Image (cartoon, grey):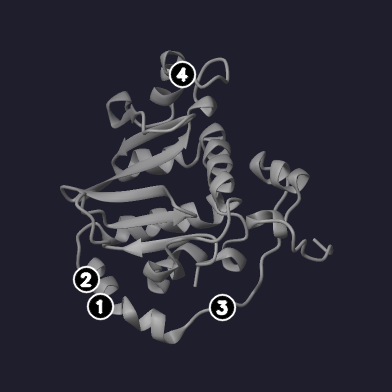
């Protein structure tokens, strides 16, 4: 990490070479992060009321707890890359009415929704990380692994977003979401997909970043 930034590189390549990225994906190394966050008080206050509204929801405790797992586990150097390369939106005004959504570049990474008093999650990932042969073939999805990665098989489902090597996973219930985030294979896949899009350049959703939610992702 002592190397100077490479200005010709885009995204996370400015801070981490490919070997370091592969080691992080595999869980073979930790990544030193900055102690201080770069933030705007004006922007923090912009979404303060929306965050207070989230706190009044019955799912708030689970949402913030799950984000406390997702942030340090699935985002490289989350303090250094906050807002510029990833962001989290609080109660975004989209038709599917999510509680929170994590984005990088132009891509949705992770979304949490209300499910009665509980929550359910949507992950966007690479299909090739979930097939039995590592190809992007929908018919070869490793369903046995998916069912074993959650508390009960009924808690997981999949879908196929548009785009090459794209795969969506839906996980129902906080217990199963936490179990999925504890699976080494699932974490490797999440890290791989997140790096793919964080390497594409600056985050397009910076304006909707909610620092109050990010506090819980960063342990502040």
Residue named by callout 3 = 38
Residue named by callout 4 = 142
Pick the quarter of the image with the N terminus. bottom right
Work out whether residue 15 can be spotted.
Answer: no
Residue 49 numbered tag: 1
- Residue at (20%, 59%) from the top-left corner? 58
Side of 106 relative to 159 (left or right): right
Residue 26 position by quadrant: top right
Label 3 to label 2: alpha-carbon separation = 25 Å
Which of the marked residues, 1 or 3, is nearer the chain's N terminus? 3
Residue 72 in the image: x percent, y percent? 55, 56
Side of 112 relative to 83 (left or right): left
Residue 217 in the image: x percent, y percent? 47, 62
Q: Nearer the viewer, mark 3 or mark 2?
A: 3
Question: Nearest the camera: 86 or 51?
Answer: 86
Residue 2 in the image: x percent, y percent? 84, 64
Residue named by callout 2 = 53
- Residue at (54%, 40%) from the top-left corner? 187
User: How dense is the environment of label 3, judged by Cα within 10 Å: few (below 14), some, or many (20 and up)?
Assistant: few
User: How dense is the environment of label 4, judged by Cα within 10 Å: few (below 14), some, or many (20 and up)?
Assistant: some
In the displayed structure, would residue 166 be above or below residue 212? above
């Amino acid at each position: 990490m002592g190397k100077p930034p490479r200005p010709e590189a885009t995204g996370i390549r400015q801070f981490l070479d490919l070997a370091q990225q592969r080691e992080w994906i595999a869980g073979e190394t930790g990544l030193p992060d900055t102690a201080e966050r770069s933030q705007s008080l004006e922007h923090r206050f912009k979404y303060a009321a929306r965050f207070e509204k989230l706190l009044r929801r019955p799912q708030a405790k689970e949402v913030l707890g799950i984000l406390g797992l997702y942030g340090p586990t699935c985002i490289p150097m989350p303090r250094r890359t906050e807002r510029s390369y990833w962001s989290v939106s609080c109660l975004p005004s989209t038709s599917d009415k999510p509680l929170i959504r994590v984005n990088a570049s132009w891509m949705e990474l992770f979304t949490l929704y209300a499910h009665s008093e509980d929550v359910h999650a949507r992950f966007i990932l690479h299909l090739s990380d979930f097939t039995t042969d590592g190809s992007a073939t929908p018919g070869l999805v490793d369903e046995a692994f998916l069912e074993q990665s959650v508390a009960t098989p009924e808690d997981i489902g999949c879908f196929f977003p548009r785009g090459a090597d794209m795969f969506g996973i839906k996980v129902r219930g906080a217990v199963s979401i936490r179990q999925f985030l504890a699976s080494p294979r699932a974490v490797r896949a999440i890290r791989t997909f997140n790096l793919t899009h964080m390497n594409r350049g600056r985050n397009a959703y910076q304006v909707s970043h909610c620092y109050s939610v990010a506090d819980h992702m960063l342990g502040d």
